[in-house]
Image: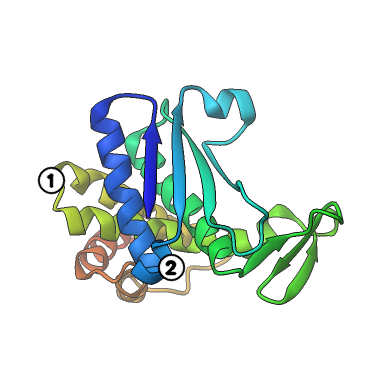
Amino acid sequence: MILHVKGSNKKLRKAVEQAAWYYAEKLMGKRLMAGIEITINLKKNLLAKEGNEGSAMWEDDGYRSREFTIELDTTVKIRNLLITLAHEMVHVKQWAKDEMYEYTNTMGLVRFKGEKIHLEETDYWDYPWEIEAYGKQLGLFVRFCEHMGFEKCDNMKEEAIEEFCDGYFYGEGEIDFTAEEVAEDAQSFFHSKMAGDHAKEYVTKILGAL
């Protein structure tokens, strides 16, 4: 894989480069990575200017694409930046594996894993490629931190795990889960015993305060 990381400072560029390589290996494997080129542009105030913390786009013909550009907002916390990078790398994987194809001759039509999706007829949160990307981003981030052994990542990992746990408390109705069940889900989701242990402790505190 050919990777270009541009903008910001040397320290952030290095962290982004390390994360991008890790995410790519987890999502695509070395064989597919060999023919891919990614340019990552680190920009200030992307969220304020364009309404998102990151974006990804193919730069060739869009069929089994091999050239991509990712943009990331550097004004957000590094935790959010690396999670957004994981999200956008999932989209890179989807294009590179030809799981997703955007028709250029039919505006607003996307093929994803054999199914044609009309963007105007589907809510953003129901796009299957976004469901996959949001579903994988936290797990990729936590596993990257553990892989690198970043001591400073401990707080960031815990925030990501707590965000996962908070999802169980959304909505109305009675609580029908235990801390142990959430911990089991977290351990499976993040592929990490540490995630399960922290989730159990976190959810136990919340349930005790209710």
- Residue 34 is situated, as x and y percent measured from the top left of the image, at 39, 62
Q: Secondary structure at mark 1?
A: helix
Q: Amino acid at mark 2?
A: Leu
Residue at the spot 61% in from the left edge and 46% down from the top edge: 59
- Residue 160 is situated, as x and y percent measured from the top left of the image, at 35, 52
Q: Which numbered dot is residue 98? A: none
Residue at the spot 31% in from the left edge and 44% down from the top edge: 17
Q: Nearer the viewer, residue 62 or 171?
A: 62
The earlier-in-sequence mark between 2 and 1 is 2
Q: Spatial distance from mark 2 to mark 1, Cα to Cα?
A: 31 Å
Q: How many marks?
A: 2
Q: Is residue 180 above or below residue 173?
A: below
Q: Which residue is mark 2?
A: 32
Image quadrant containing the N terminus: bottom left
Q: Nearer the viewer, mark 2 or mark 1?
A: 2
Query: Which colour style is shown?
Result: rainbow
Badge 2 vs badge 1, beta-carbon distance below 8 Å:
no
Q: Is residue 94 above or below residue 67?
A: below
Image quadrant containing the C terminus: bottom left
Q: Amino acid at mark 1?
A: Glu
Residue at the spot 53% in from the left edge and 48% down from the top edge: 68
- Occupied quadrant, residue 33: bottom left
Q: Which residue is mark 1?
A: 151
Q: Secondary structure at mark 2?
A: helix
The answer to whether residue 58 shows anywhere in this view is yes
